[in-house]
Image (tube, rainbow, N blue to C red):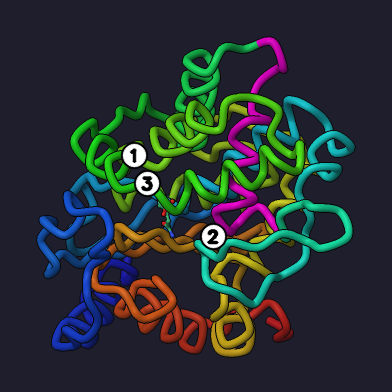
Amino acid sequence: SVVPDYLREALSDVEPDTSGEPAGYIPELAAADPDRLGAVFATTDGEVYGAGDIDTEFTIQSISKPFTYALALADRGFGPVLAKVGVEPSGEAFNQISLESDTGRPYNPMINAGAITVHALAGPPELTPVERVERVVEGLSAFAGRRLTMDEAVCASELEHAHRNLAIAHMLRSHDILTEDPRSVVDGYTRQCSVLVTTRDLAVMAATLANRGINPLSGERVIPEPVVRQVLSVMSTCGMYDAAGDWATQVGIPAKSGVAGGLIGALPGQIGIATFSPRLDRHGNSVRGVSLFERFSADMGLHVMEVP
Ligand code: GLN
């Protein structure tokens, strides 16, 4: 196949760009090698092509948000989830401390306020916090098609500095959006963000969204089709935070970034794409990941608003 050659060429073109900085607010993340670079394509018919650092593990961080949103929608149904978390782009940073003024809901599930709330909605209501984390890890693993583990060091490091997420969770508790101890929800959410994935895993997870909720490698149905539509819609409007508009015009693929440097895109019926490069722009999105996606979209005509 010519695809690996194409990917290698794309990686070498973006490699000289060392602008941006790895996330600094989670000390353990700042220790990661900033030069790592990888890209993987996973098609809906189960082909996987990659180049660069495709089997290096890093923490999933905010890329867990669309998948946990999917699990909550599948486990609880749309009504209970939408009652607590909206679907409006906030146009704000991922960790902005803000809620809808009339309803008290977080604007959307891709910013931290929404994702912390969504974590508490994963699994049936009777689960303990520990069981809920297990439900999330098991669900993320089904998307990836292999059993995923957690980076305890990154998790502990983030929890030590989780003041902002705790402030958000306490605010959510004061509005009765959260109805349990905010500290245990932030603990579970941080564990969710600390799940270890490779670029290959992320591409397969994205391909599962692109493939109507069926993992194209394992054949397992992970989530129902209506949930896929909801998740991809929210990714396309909110997945890149306050850069979502630039992304929608320049790349035009439903996407999600994470502060460890991962980035995914899912093109319905076609392909899941993942890139990994830890240096981030001022929005918290991977600099070289964004460049790679711009190139993939232009070279292959992947923009969803373009007639193929
Ligand atoms: N765990 C990180 C946080 O809550 C995730 C943020 C991100 O990846 N954008 O701050």
Q: What kind of element bears circle 3?
A: loop
Q: Which residue is mark 2?
A: 271
Image label count: 3
Q: Is residue 68 above or below residue 110?
A: above
Mark 2 vs mark 3, CA separation in Å = 35 Å
* Residue 26 lies in quadrant: bottom left
Question: Which residue sits at x=55%, y=20%?
Answer: 132
Residue 92: horizontal and vertical position, in percent?
Answer: 59, 74
Q: Which quadrant does the N terminus fall into? A: bottom left
Q: Are marks 1 and 2 in contact (CB under 8 Å)?
A: no
Q: Residue 110: percent from the left, percent from the top?
A: 60, 57
Q: Residues within 10 Å of mark 3 (few under 14, many from 20)?
A: some
Q: Which residues are magenta?
A: 108-126
Residue at image point 68% right, 30% down? 121
- Which residue, given by chain and number where applicable, does mark 1 sit on? 194
Q: Is residue 172 above or below residue 306?
A: above
The residue at which mark 3 appears reads as 162
Is 188 on the left-hand or right-hand side of 221?
Answer: left
Q: Is the residue at mark 1 in contact range of ligand 1, meaning its CB lies under 8 Å from it?
A: yes
